[in-house]
Image: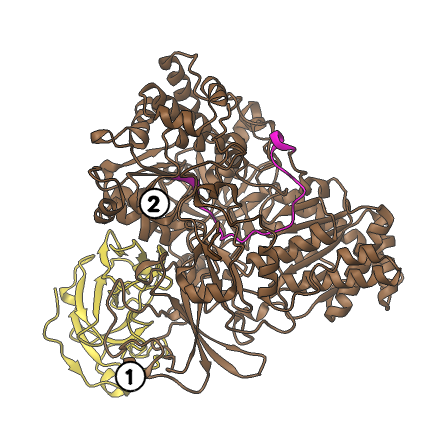
Amino acid sequence: MSNIGRRDALPIPPTNAEVKNTVCQYCTVGCGYKVYTWPVGSQGGLAANQNAFGVDLRNPQNPLGGLVYTETMHSIVTRKDGRQYHVVIVPANDSPINFKRDHSSRGATNAVATWSDARATKERLKYPLLRMGDQFQVITWDEALAILAGVAKGIRDKDGNDDNIVVKAFDHGGSGAGFENNWGVGSLFFKGFSVKHIGIHNRPAYNSEVWGSRERGVHELNYDAIDARLADTIVLWGANPYETASVFYTEHMQPNIQGATLEEKQRNLSRGEPVEAGYMIVVDPRRTSSLTIAENIAKDRTLHLRPNLGTDYILANAIARVMWERKYYDQRFLETRTDMAKFEEYKEKSLKVGTPYAQFMAEVERITGVRRADIEKAADWIAKPKAGGFARRTLTIYEKGIIWNMKNYDQVAAIVQMAVLGNNVGRAGTGCGRLGGHQEGYVRPPSPTPGSIYNGGPPVNVDKYLTDGKGKLYWVIGTNPYLSTPNNQLFRKRIRERTKALSDFLGQSGEPGTTQEWVAKILEGLDATNGLFMVVQDLYLIHTAQDAHLVLPASAWGEANQTSINCNSRLLRLYEKFMDPPGQAKQDWEICKLMGLKMAELYRAEGKEEEAKRFEFGKNWRTDEDVFLDGGNSYPNNAIPASEEATLPAECYKGVTYAFLRQVGQQGIRTPVRVENGKPVGTLRRYSVKFGTKDGKFSWYGTDDWEGYPEEVAKYLEGEKAQKYPFWMTTGRAQAIWQTMYNDRFLPEKMNTLPMPYIEIHPQDAQRLGLRGGDLAQVWNEEGNGTFLVYVTDSVRPGMIFALQYHHLGTSNSMTPGYTDPKTTIPWYKGTRVAIRKVRGALPDLQNSTSFLQQNKFD
Amino acid sequence: MVVSRRRVVQVLGGVTMASLTGAGKAQFWFAPSLTYPAIKVGNVNNLKNNEPVYFNYPDARSQGILVKLGRPAIGGVGRERDIVAFSAACTHMGCGVQYKGGRFLCPCHYSMFDPAKAAAVYQGLASTGLPQIQLGIAQNGDIFARAVNGLIWGRARNI
């Protein structure tokens, strides 16, 4: 017995199967994949000349390099011609990212996540849906857009601005998004509309998550994957790549720690430079698998720093202070490449050079809980020059543990400054940037927020704007805020209350039958009830959509051509279309184009030619490539020398065409792209000559002092509440699932592995609470509640739990507070206090089928 | 221990399997799409808890791993329903898994599989559990491999 259907044979693509290049739709790494499609009814043979793989399948494949074709890499889909087709999606053998056909458990399920009416993915949306009282009714695009445009125009006509048009939309690559769809969404809301109340998919505002780095002159995507193989030391700060960027870890970091890249180091680094197997520093409240695997390989070259939650920037500054004391810096580099006037502010506020070293370090130990000896060891590993006076090469990679920490701006700034002090940006084997979560593909007209509080910000907290009762139209695109916003329980309740108020109004005396009356009654109801008209544009009827008035079906990865870059090499590639979307689902860019044209039609009918023209941004978009090229043209002049690359936006691809991308295939091209002699040229590594500031010099910043925790969390640390909510809770992701599980919830492999959201708890705490692996626990505080499965593990310390952030059956965000960094409006999703109790009883079937073994134990 | 002298038993239908104990165990608990041989891979009397036995199945080019867990397992046979067997090729990239500390661990990229839960992958890059080899036990305690539930890595079909 096994509760997942298994297969013991797979169809073999015949030699005439169609072959397409693509890139995994999921994580930041962007592994290359090949897609084979052919009509059901035929098959290839086992001999190499009888199948499209060109591989001899009569003999088993060689491990670590042979063809990878596993059970989840095949499915059958139906195309618009009504016929069934086999789809095989296997790791490519010619990718500079996933060597040897490596792949993750996410990418391996690309094929089974495709839409089919014969599988669980039949839940995909096919047609626009309109709420009629308590039901959704299928309508046409024409009808849906007439209602939506009518409502949007009615709101604008009344207000004279777009303040009440509120948007939450993806801004990423991969996952059916990419440059085309970003340009479509951006054009609708920033060219057609002038929306300023817009939030990005996973947070309450329209902001960079790393202004603390960008405003220093360092875009967060500045290194290449090769740097992880060349580095003397890799620092993972609030980043767990084994689980969230798996192949970047297994193909680029792990070999370095194992000493398997020495030859590559000798070839690429300076002549005579000493090379050895890599060191790894992991800064994380948990003993993550990225740490414990490295420990398993080389305990003596692995260091774990475990700062108290929220204190990371104090720790980064302390490591930098050690570097300063021990003179681990290059004075000439500082003087020629960085702003020395601002450096004084950094020395005073961040390094606190005015405070005696011993006193400073004692204070840091008290705040962070990290021992002075470990801080000094970290500084040595990061920046102590090597034998012969060669500068050490350290690659520092951070992600949500820093970004979604308390004081986002100062956290990010402290880490990039620590890296630049050691001259660890812009050289081979160095860099300081994000690990990334998803891929990127941002190209949009200018957005409404220029920067942090130091540059015209901070941006508006759109979640709060809505929960405060403002806004009339709320349009959610490609994200599920009922799982992803902070203070989630409050957000859900408030949005439901406001959307229901409008639904109830529309139902009074019966819902109107004509479009015009429908629009008029919505507009009337918005004023009468302070309600909210909610539109959800997505692949599925997600949680948020259940309260929507209008649902628009979007098409997915593989159902159109699209382009994106990965984060670890900024590698731009073409993701080719290999199947049709379900029903009438459309790409986001096309929905935005059609909405724009519908708005133009309404304005033109009133003789408002100027307004009509604003909304006709997409009238010449016929193909995916039209949109790609239109977006590309918005970048500045890129016919500039390599030494000027720092002046370009990180994702600049001007001059690149689909034909070019087809030609380069999996090799892609690294953005920012420059044009030399009429040909596009990529950028391997950034900031080797200049930083991305006006004068090209790194712009230092003095971080704040330690000021304790914000009120929203500090309230739990005193008096009665300290007794009542005795646990710290930090949050994050799990290896097996992707984001909010929008696809994974339909895949039995995923649901068997992670049937519910879970917490990790230390054995001592578990024993005290009577909890065992597989039990259920209620976790709560004044913000909200959640029911979680229990894993008992030493990954967390006593007194702290880890909770899975997104699962389709619940989110840790219900308990996170509404706090955001006042400098950037970025939330602190990863720290608050909670109470925990064992839920009586158990779910025996789930305990029988799911593993509760310790996930970070590899010895 | 490697079973070097495999005894290939006639397969198919109930006739051969009638020699195996327990009517229930003689049924396949899944529907194999291929015809598998029945091969002797060990004897219950020689198995010790947590001491794995390696064997080849369904042919000489595929290693299997047989283990008595000492606790009941999905698909387990024997009095304690704790004897299980799986393909030893990691379903990620084909490296041989090790039985260590009560679970299967792949030394190449660290995927881990829970032997009591049909070798479900509970950590790592593998996307499916290790293929489980269905076992049957004859009256004299001989353990037979009878079919493979799941695709053995590196093959388009198991046989």
Secondary structure under badge 2? helix
**Going by the picture, which residue comes out furthest to the left?**
B5
Q: Is residue A728 above or below residue A570?
A: above
Q: Colour of chain A?
A: brown
- Magenta segment boundaries in residue numbering: A431-456
How many neighbours does mark 2 have within 10 angstroms: few (below 14), some (14-19), or many (20 or more)?
many
Q: Is residue A533 left or right of residue B83?
A: right
Task: Say which element carries label 1.
Answer: loop
Image vertical order of residue A200 relative to residue B159, above or below? above
Q: CA distance from mark 1 to mark 2?
A: 50 Å
Q: Chain of mark 1?
A: B
Q: Is residue A221 visible?
A: yes
Residue located beneath label 2 in the image:
A227
Quadrant position of residue B10: bottom left
Residue at the image position 58 percent from the left and 71 percent from the top: A581
In reply to whether residue A434 is colored magenta, the answer given is yes
Residue A10's label in the rendered image is none
Image location of residue A442, percent across then percent down: 56, 51
Which chain, by letter, is yellow? Answer: B
Colouring chosen for the image of the structure = by chain
Q: Amino acid at mark 2?
A: Asp
What residue would you read off at disc 1? Answer: B35
Left or right placement of residue B47 versus residue A341 in this view: left
